[in-house]
Amino acid sequence: MAKKKKGAQSFDVGARLRNIKTLLQTQRSKEGIAYMFILYTMLCRAKYGEIKKPQQSIREFGMIMCNQHNQDPQKVYPFIQQVEAIIYGGRQPTADAFQQTYEIFGNVFEEITGKKIPPISI
């Protein structure tokens, strides 16, 4: 039987995706996008045992995942750039920006889990 990597954990991905949908339905799309990044860090912890340290920026964590765990930078970096732009941009994202971010996150999600992310809509 394969051992879990140190720091690895399991959690209900479906519940986390429902949380994102709830945030979208309650017009809290910026929080929903931030939660996508949190889910990304949770997936990385579960699969690779990599924990995001509080002092690491969003970009630094993404770079570590690409450099040390061979995640595809063509999938990770667009997601990281979108999250940074929305979180630090000072404006609420439009429904289109949310949907675009979710689709970009879907590429990263599929790379990590091997499964397509379920569609989300309000």
Image (cartoon, rainbow, N blue to C red):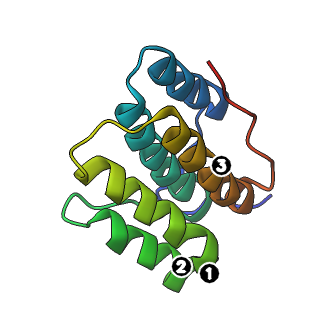
Label 1: which residue?
Answer: 70
Label drawn at residue 16 = none
The secondary element bearing badge 3 is classed as helix
Q: Mark 1 belongs to which amino acid? A: Asn
Residue drawn at x 36%, y 33% is 31
The secondary element bearing badge 1 is classed as loop
Question: Rounded to the nearest whole Å, what is the CA distance between mark 1 and mark 3?
Answer: 21 Å
Report the residue that reaches farthest toward the bottom. 67
The secondary element bearing badge 2 is classed as helix
Question: Rounded to the nearest whole Å, what is the CA distance between mark 2 and mark 1?
Answer: 5 Å
Label 2: which residue?
Answer: 66
Label 3: which residue?
Answer: 103
* Disc on the earlier residue, 2 or 3: 2
Mark 2 and mark 3 residues within 8 Å of each other at the beta carbon: no
Residue 27 sits in quarter: top left
* Quadrant assignment for the C terminus: top right
Residue drawn at x 50%, y 73% is 65
> Which of labels 1 and 3 is toward the front?
3
Q: Where is residue 6 drawn, in percent x and y?
A: 50, 62
Is 53 left, or right, of 104 in this rendering? left
Residue 71 in view, yes or no: no
Q: Where is residue 104 drawn, in percent x and y?
A: 61, 55
- Whether 30 is drawn above or below 18: the answer is below
Residue drawn at x 38%, y 42% is 34
Residue 69 in view, yes or no: yes
* Quadrant assignment for the N terminus: bottom right
Mark 2 and mark 1 residues within 8 Å of each other at the beta carbon: yes
Q: Mark 2 belongs to which amino acid? A: Cys
Q: Where is residue 21 drawn, in percent x and y?
A: 56, 23
Q: Mark 3 belongs to which amino acid? A: Glu
Q: Where is residue 117 drawn, in percent x and y?
A: 73, 42
